[in-house]
Amino acid sequence: MHYSNENLIKEITDNGFILLPNILSKGEIVTLRKLIKNHFSSRGVSTILGLTQPNAAVEVPDINWIFYHPKILAVMRQLLGQEEIMFTSHCDLHCRTLSAWHKDDGMTVMKGGYFGFPTYDQEDCKVYKIALYLQDHDHNKAGLTVRKGSHKFSDINQGEETYLKTKAGDIIIFDVRLTHTGQRDVFPVDFLQKPNDLIKKGLKKILKISPQKSDQYLKQIYDTLYGDRLSIFFTYGFPNDYTKNFAINNMKRQIKQNKNSKLFLSMENRQKFIENNILLAEEYFEKLKK
Ligand SMILES: O=C(O)CCC(=O)C(=O)O
Ligand SMILES: [Fe+2]
């Protein structure tokens, strides 16, 4: 890795994110795409024009190797400044979904957010999400856009907008308090915005097709041409109360979305985490049991 410890830590502390190129191999990306496509062929939760799978560490055991991938663990340990790091059991998989500006600290999900209170001025709050897009996003705007330094502010309009041009195999790590968005437009390329608006107006006027319906059709066309947009998001943290509270409350959100109460990793995967010397937030999930 060409980053020094200090640079990495400074970047995530100052800007709230880092982009690390070439972490996963082509073969690993192909395997992940296959596993995730296969999963979504029969499962997943419907969202805006796509599918999502919350609690994927529990729901999709076959992808667990990515959580203890040696290169990812090495970076997380560098960033958190010690060997002891905690896996939160947060993992969402996405397929073809659209997004809008938000933070992942849960402030819009529950009172006080996942931490229980606003933490924008708390330096000990070190909960970092890994974003893995399983296709290139250097030619379109369907990857991740962030607001630089916004992990320090509650206002989601604050912070300079930065689009992160990623290639499959790159990873982004960001503070869960950072304001960010995935793909916002059905056609995620600037030069198609105007034609897209015109087509939608035409479809509404001539064929009486609602903008929502035409968005659905147009998105289907785009996805067929460019392939399914797949991504994996999962979260590690410094082993303290911020990370534990994040994990517990985020798990409440995940099982609510899945409409089930599956809280725990498989024995086999749990063992793998332990072998890799990773602390597990699921140790604190007992009280979530019904
Ligand atoms: O749709 C995306 O690419 C972003 C997803 C995201 O922000 C999330 O899972 O929290
Ligand atoms: Fe997010």
Image (cartoon, rainbow, N blue to C red):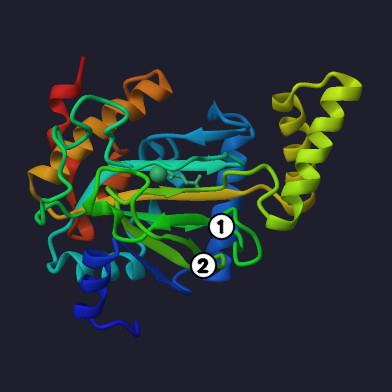
Q: Position of residue 206 (x, y in %)?
A: 91, 23
Instruction: Tell me: 7 left or right of 137.
Output: left
Q: Residues within 10 Å of mark 2 (few under 14, many from 20)?
A: many
Q: Position of residue 148 (x, y in %)?
A: 35, 61
Is residue 128 at all visible to an observer of this figure?
Answer: no
Q: Position of residue 143 (x, y in %)?
A: 54, 56
User: Which residue appears at 71% of the width and 51% of the height?
Assistant: 227
Instruction: Tell me: 75 left or right of 143.
Output: left
Q: Position of residue 33 (x, y in %)?
A: 59, 52
On screen, 236 above or below 254?
A: below
Q: Which residue is mark 1?
A: 134
Quarter occupied by the C terminus? top left
Q: Which residue is mark 2?
A: 169
On screen, 261 above or below 1?
A: above
Amino acid at pointer 2: Gly
Q: Residues within 10 Å of mark 1 (few under 14, many from 20)?
A: many
Q: Quadrant of residue 96?
A: top right
Q: Which mark is residue 280?
A: none
User: Which residue appears at 24% of the width and 67% of the height?
Assistant: 14
